Image (spheres, coloured by chain):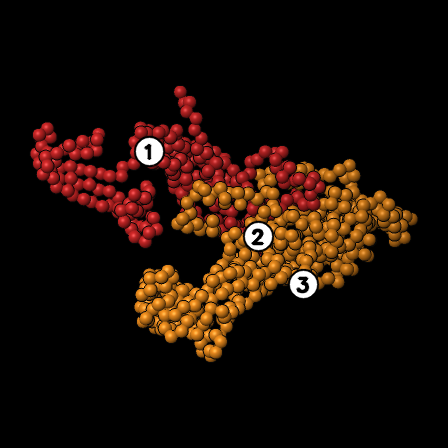
Chain colours: A orange, B red
């Protein structure tokens, strides 16, 4: 027998006494830190790494700061990648306290692998300095088997390298630490939409309707529609129209011809010629209305604000006329270069109607979000109601209507949110409409991509094409 | 001796051109079920910078919760070397129009230099690095040309090839756990640029008309011109938006535009000669 049998080398009672004393010391001399376990969202095989993580639990625990006279590590250094903070800290926590008060909760969570001990990759929020440390190594044998057992974990930590991990512990002091970090996109939202207004301009001897007799083939762009001139010499008497193409069975052809101005003073149906656009074969004829006034064009008195899709245009039936005499129109929308919001650009006519006096009403349906509602909450998930794209709120400024978001997905699109769709806060219920989705991260003080882009616009000729993106 | 001040900012322009090539690179993460839950635009910056400026802009608040945000790209010039293979004759000059007026400028042939660039990519995950690499590498075979307006005053656009020379990867995944894994890809490029000398003024203007007189005899002292052939530019687009392309548009043609020619032959029997100084027949 190698050991002296008259000494116990550490009985269970002695070990418990030491553990209790350590626990007590940690409660007296320690710092209250928050332990945040890492949950794997996606783990890549072959190259073996966790590609997406989230941190949404928090556990308070007392820890002794080993490097009591300051952080270890290289401190703040300037690297070729900008500022890097290389602070390190070693924290000692009680093994018993972890196993009794944290491990059972972690064990109950299906998203957490290995719950019996603190793990490399977990986070610790250190309140003295508001730092998020990542555990690099868990030392469990230091001090080395005193009275035959180990009583503490030593957590060797480095400041967290942040990418796009979700930090949603529900403790504001922790979650807001990465409020300005990582990739942040800006959504310019529309606070209050404005309904567009228009009034009809009427005239006789105008085109009543254009009939597309042959939609042609092999077009690469919208062809030009030419309409023979009106016998009237007055300004605006010549009819104009545009062709809209679509792709059918692999060939781009004319889908419809929309009237922008039905003209007036025609005594016989004008000739319509369709040229250009790279294709051929399209042909159209038209009918005219010489018996009464039709709606020949519209005067847009208010272009509106905040349209995501083209609104529906309804033109009133003239007094005493039938539904068959009703003029029909289609609105098109586009971004107003001065405000950046979608507005009604043009109202086309598909049928100019008959019997109009000019006093009839033109009703244009409201934009999707006539008035934004609610307040987005920090860290809540917002969703584009048409794209399905989700993101997390980093910051919401009601005055400027700029919503900063991180963790931007792409939903069913190829690039994420798109102008015109509604953005809903899934927790707050806040609802506004997107005007501009700006992918450039203007919050990151390191990024100079925008500066390169604007400076390069003055120097570089990308008129042919730039395969690296749209500049 | 070398005293004429000029500064075309060739290096700065090349740095801007290089930087803008890589400022639209994205990294995506999915949730394992195929749904993209994060689409990041990778930030890029020119690496060298004033230390105090870096500190006060990137760490304005002294207490910062995290070490750094990743992924990141940075680049810097590593060397400047003369490229003798692209050198043209030192006495050759060419004329270029001043972009501000119709005067001509005399330009000596530029000196070819190669600027070495290192593009560094720091990522947290190997998959991020591979996504970034795949968005860059197919475009360099091994060069990629960019047209850069190197000298603004003469509108001198040159195709500058950016040639990918080498790729190195640093992955410190071995060792003790206290040392963090660093994943850095370094792509070495050569930008084949040119340095221009002082741009000199000349009294010459743009040639907008060519006139050739034919004589009936080879004795130029006695022979008189009998036929005149003139060529002037002819507009191919409606510059003044009057819906017709006519001689009024011809006057508005700019150098570099796509234009045709109006050729005129005139026959004379008046026994006169052209006086170049006065511009008339006498």
The structure residue drawn at horizontal position 39% and vertical position 49%, both measured from the top left corner, is A464
Q: Is residue A159 visible?
A: no
Please, is residue A148 above or below residue A300 in the view?
A: above
**Number of marks present in the image shown:** 3
| Mark nearer the N terminus (1 vs 2) | 2
Q: Nearer the viewer, residue A267 or A124?
A: A267
The structure residue drawn at horizontal position 74% and vertical position 56%, both measured from the top left corner, is A170
Report the residue marked by disc 1.
B104
Same chain under badges 1 and 2? The reply is yes
Q: Is residue A33 visible?
A: yes
Question: SS at mark 3?
Answer: loop
Report the residue marked by disc 3.
A429
Residue B205 spot, x, y in % from top left: 30, 34
Question: SS at mark 2?
Answer: strand
Kindly give the residue lying farthest to the top in the view shown.
Answer: B1
User: Cα distance, mark 1 to mark 2?
Assistant: 48 Å
């Amino acid at each position: 027998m190698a050991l002296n049998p008259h000494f116990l080398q550490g009985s269970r009672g002695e070990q418990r006494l030491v553990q209790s004393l350590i626990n007590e010391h940690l409660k007296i001399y320690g710092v209250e830190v928050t332990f945040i376990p890492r949950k794997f969202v996606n783990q890549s095989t072959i190259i073996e790494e966790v590609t997406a993580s989230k941190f949404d639990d928090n556990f308070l625990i007392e820890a002794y700061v080993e490097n009591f006279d300051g952080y270890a590590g290289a401190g703040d250094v300037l690297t070729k990648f900008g500022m890097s903070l290389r602070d390190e800290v070693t924290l000692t926590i009680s093994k018993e306290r972890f196993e009794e008060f944290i491990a059972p909760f972690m064990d109950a969570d299906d998203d957490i692998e290995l719950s019996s001990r603190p793990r490399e990759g977990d986070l610790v929020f250190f309140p003295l300095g508001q730092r998020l440390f990542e555990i690099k190594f868990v030392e469990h044998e230091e001090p080395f088997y005193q009275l035959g057992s180990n009583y503490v974990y030593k957590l060797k930590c480095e400041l967290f390298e942040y990418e796009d991990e979700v930090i949603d512990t529900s403790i504001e002091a922790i979650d807001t630490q990465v409020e300005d970090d990582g990739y942040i996109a800006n959504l310019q939202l529309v606070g209050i939409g404005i309904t567009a207004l228009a009034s009809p301009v009427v005239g006789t001897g105008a085109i009543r309707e254009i009939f597309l007799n042959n939609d042609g083939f092999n077009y690469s762009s919208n062809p030009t529609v030419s309409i023979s001139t009106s016998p009237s010499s007055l300004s605006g008497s010549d009819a104009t129209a545009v062709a809209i193409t679509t792709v059918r069975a692999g060939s781009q052809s004319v889908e419809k011809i929309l009237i922008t101005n039905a003209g007036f003073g025609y005594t016989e149906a004008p000739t319509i010629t369709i040229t250009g656009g790279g294709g051929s074969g399209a042909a159209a004829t038209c009918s005219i209305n010489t018996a009464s006034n039709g709606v020949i064009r519209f005067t847009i008195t208010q272009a509106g604000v905040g349209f995501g899709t083209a609104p529906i245009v309804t033109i009133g039936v003239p007094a005493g006329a039938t539904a068959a005499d009703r003029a029909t129109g289609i609105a098109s929308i586009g971004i107003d270069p001065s405000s950046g919001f979608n507005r009604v650009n043009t109202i086309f006519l598909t049928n100019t109607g008959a019997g109009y006096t000019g006093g009839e009403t033109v009703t244009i349906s409201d934009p999707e979000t006539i008035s934004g509602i609610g307040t987005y909450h920090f860290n809540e998930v917002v969703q584009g109601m048409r794209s399905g794209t989700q993101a997390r709120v980093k910051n919401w400024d009601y005055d400027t209507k700029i919503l900063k978001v991180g963790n931007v997905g792409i939903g069913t699109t190829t690039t994420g949110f798109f102008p015109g769709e509604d953005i809903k806060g899934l927790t707050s219920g806040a609802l506004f409409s997107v005007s501009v989705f700006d992918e450039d991260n203007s919050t990151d003080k390191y990024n100079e991509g925008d500066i390169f882009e604007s400076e390069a616009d003055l120097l570089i000729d990308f008129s042919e094409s730039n395969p690296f993106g749209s500049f | 001796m070398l005293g004429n001040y000029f500064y075309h900012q060739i290096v700065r322009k090349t740095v801007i051109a290089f930087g803008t090539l890589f400022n639209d690179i994205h990294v995506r993460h999915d949730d394992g079920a195929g749904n993209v839950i994060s689409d990041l635009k990778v930030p890029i910056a020119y690496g060298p910078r004033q230390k105090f400026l870096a500190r006060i802009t990137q760490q304005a608040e002294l207490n910062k919760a995290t070490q750094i945000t990743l992924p990141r790209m940075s680049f810097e010039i590593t060397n400047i070397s003369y490229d003798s293979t692209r050198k043209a004759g030192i006495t050759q000059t060419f004329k270029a129009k001043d972009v501000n007026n119709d005067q001509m400028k005399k330009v000596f042939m530029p000196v070819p230099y190669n600027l070495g660039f290192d593009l560094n990519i720091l990522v947290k995950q190997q998959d991020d690095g591979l996504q970034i690499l795949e968005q860059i590498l197919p475009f360099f075979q091994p060069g990629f040309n960019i047209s850069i307006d190197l000298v603004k005053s003469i509108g001198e656009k040159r195709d500058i090839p950016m040639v990918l020379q080498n790729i190195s990867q640093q992955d410190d995944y071995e060792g003790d756990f206290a040392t963090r894994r660093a994943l850095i890809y370094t792509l070495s490029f050569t930008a084949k640029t040119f340095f221009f000398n002082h741009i000199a003024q000349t009294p010459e203007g743009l040639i907008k008309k060519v006139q050739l007189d034919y004589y009936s005899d080879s004795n130029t002292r006695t022979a008189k011109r009998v036929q005149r052939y003139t060529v002037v530019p002819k507009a191919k687009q409606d510059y003044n938006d009057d819906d017709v392309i006519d001689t009024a548009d011809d006057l508005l043609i700019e150098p570099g535009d796509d234009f045709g020619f109006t050729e005129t032959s005139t026959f004379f029997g008046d026994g006169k000669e052209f006086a170049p100084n006065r511009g008339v027949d006498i």
